[in-house]
Amino acid sequence: MNSTYYLNQLDKLLPTTMGKFYIAFVLGFINQLKNKKEVDSNDIVEASDGLITAKVLSKTLKNLGLIYRRTSEYISKLHRPSIYLWNIKDIRNVCSFYCIHPISLEELHTAIKGKTSTITSKIVQKAPIIDSNSVIGANPLEPKTIPYLDSILPFVIPSYHPKEVDVIADIWNINWGYDFRMSYSFVRKMLTQSIPTVTPKKLWLHENMQSKCLEFNYNQDDNGYPMINQSLLNKFSPTATAEYLNVGTFPATSLTRLVGMVSHPYLAWGIVKKYEPRQYVSHHICFNPSCINPAHLKPMTEEEHNFLHKKINDIHPINHPSHLNILDNNIQSTQH
């Protein structure tokens, strides 16, 4: 995804189009703080020369899925003003999600005056720069730079000991006739192509790095679920021949289902391609069909899955069979 994509996502999330300039300034401010875990709203407002009000700051950060810790300062029995503290690490994580880079107070002044075009290109730069002190954008020349997904991927996708991989590979090969290592590597690669997305309406999820949706915006079916076909394989593995890497390489044509299978490799999922009964499906606890975050995919029996969606009567394909992808009507109607 290019910078324009991230800028558009920020404009959708934030209360005003100026929000992206505010968060970039906040990032620049916290980059100057050393050995601090939290930042006071009042300190940010003061550092901005009042260009950012406490109310606007709070709304901007909340819309990005951030939460504050409220405390108070004792001045007298009758005067104990509230203090709102924001977790610095969480702010940096959000900035990394959207490849946000810091701007200075002078640059914020320029944007406020209406000269936004000169500053916009500086705000979002792909990929984000994280120096050895975990300060985003602090040193563009720092050789130790890592994209956000590379830093959290080991925590998102399950890790296995080499000896356990041998066991799992044998199970998959004997029971299903598929290569577990190939599926695992493919899922890992697709996760690196996903977009971390902060979704405020899903704040009931535990607020940590794994709670963010990882949206895969390629080759989605009519219902928004990413599918595996030869076009997708050619796009991300252009040097691999169709004979070596094709749709038949994997036990599922739904990327959502394949992620679930790799994350829970011991379950008897049932291979629909081989006309086996579907024992388990990958249920999105985030209710976001384009998300492939393993932490958001819960194995459920087909009966449980159908019951849940029919009970809440949401827009899931189970409740709207006319919206199903006709090509895979008999295979994928309930596997997401």
Image (tube, rainbow, N blue to C red):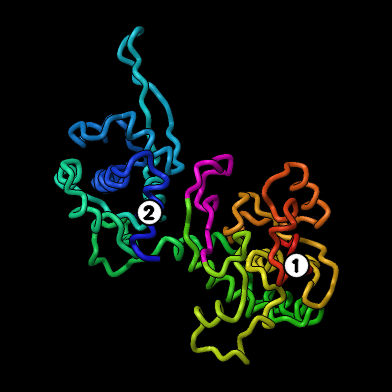
Residue 180 coordinates in the image, percent (x, y): 68, 77
Camera-near label (1 vs 2) is 1
Q: Residue at x 84, y 75 (%)?
A: 275
Asked whether residue 158 appears in the rendered view, the answer is no
Which of the two residues, 195 or 218, is positioned nearer the viewer here? 218
Q: Which residue is drawn at 24% across and 60% down?
A: 139
Q: Is mark 1 on a helix, strand or loop?
A: loop
Position of 276 relative to 130 (above/below)? below
Q: In this view, does 165 lie to the left or right of 172?
A: left
Residue that mark 2 sits on: 8
Q: From which residue to which does the magenta span run?
A: 198-217
Q: Earlier in the sequence, mark 1 or mark 2?
A: 2
Amino acid identity at mark 1: Asn
Amino acid identity at mark 2: Asn
| Label 2, residues with CA under 10 Å away: few <14, some 14-19, many ≥20 | few
Inspect the magenta stretch and tell me whether residue 209 lies in it: yes
Which of the two residues, 185 or 217, is positioned nearer the viewer here? 217
Q: Residue at x 48, y 60 (%)?
A: 152
Residue 55 coordinates in the image, percent (x, y): 34, 29
The outermost residue toward the front is: 322
Inspect the magenta stretch and tell me whether residue 283 lies in it: no
Residue that mark 1 sits on: 329
